[in-house]
Image: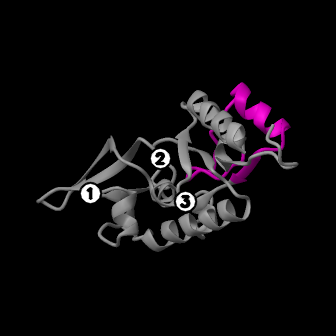
Amino acid sequence: MSKHTDPIKILVSACLLGQRVRYDGGHSESDAHLLAQWRAQGRVVAFCPEVAGGLGTPRPPAQIVDADGDAVLDGTARILTHGGQDVTAAFIAGAQATLQVAKRAAIRIAILKSKSPSCGSQRIYNTRLQPDGSAHSALVPGAGVTTALLRRHQISVFNEHQLELARVRLNELIAIS
């Protein structure tokens, strides 16, 4: 633990902690030992950007169109549900709410759900619009909107498959605090 009385906090996608906030009304609870250890140490701050942005549970699945989270933040890309509803504003609002929580808790590390248009950190599902007006969904390299915003504020973002990397980063932060 750090020299400070409070442990360094880690933001974690609420769905990874068993909260039923995923688009399908489910969760993606992780049984990872490190997450359990961090919870026991009082390090974990649970949050769901999509719910914070005003999207319900369950909700229609959505994907970034022809881009990634950085492009959404820059105003050059949209997020659409499979039915074509534009939910970009809700995703941006959720990312901003996540950043506010992270700032209040002095978060420097986040563990977010992989492949999500909000939380994905390495790859996201993306909709590619075709010349004939049809759409094709694919898993592509990129980050979700919340991940992109957190990274712009020097918060290290990992997914649930990168917990060992997150542990290394946490130990670095403890060592310098």
Q: Earlier in the sequence, mark 2 or mark 1?
A: 1
Asked whether residue 83 is in view, the answer is no
Residue type highlighted by circle 3 = Arg
Q: Which residue is nearer to you in this view: 62 or 168?
A: 168
Is residue 124 depicted above or below 38 in this figure? below
Mark 2 and mark 1: span between their CA atoms? 15 Å
Contact (Cβ within 8 Å) of mark 1 with mark 3 = no
Read off the residue under disc 1: 66
* For marks 1 and 3 on the same chain, the one whose residue lies earlier in the sequence: 3
Q: Considering the image in quadrants, where does the C terminus appear?
A: top right
Residue 153, percent from left and from top: 52, 60
* 26 in the magenta segment: yes
At label 1, the amino acid type is Asp
Q: Nearer the viewer, residue 154 or 18?
A: 154
Which residue is located at x 36 percent, y 47 percent? 142
Left or right of residue 3: residue 118: left
- Disc assigned to residue 120: 2
Residue 23 place in picture, x, y as percent? 55, 53
Q: Which residues are magenta?
A: 19-46
What is the spatial separation of the Cα atoms under label 1 and label 3, in whole angstroms?
21 Å
Identify the residue position indicated by label 3 in the image: 59
Q: Vertically, is 110 above or below 99?
A: above
Q: Residues within 10 Å of mark 2 (few under 14, many from 20)?
A: many
**In the orientation shown, which residue stands out farthest toward the left?**
131
Question: How many labels were placed on the picture?
Answer: 3
Kind of residue sitting beneath label 2: Gly
- Say which element carries label 3: loop
At numbered mark 2, what does the secondary structure look like: helix, strand or loop? loop
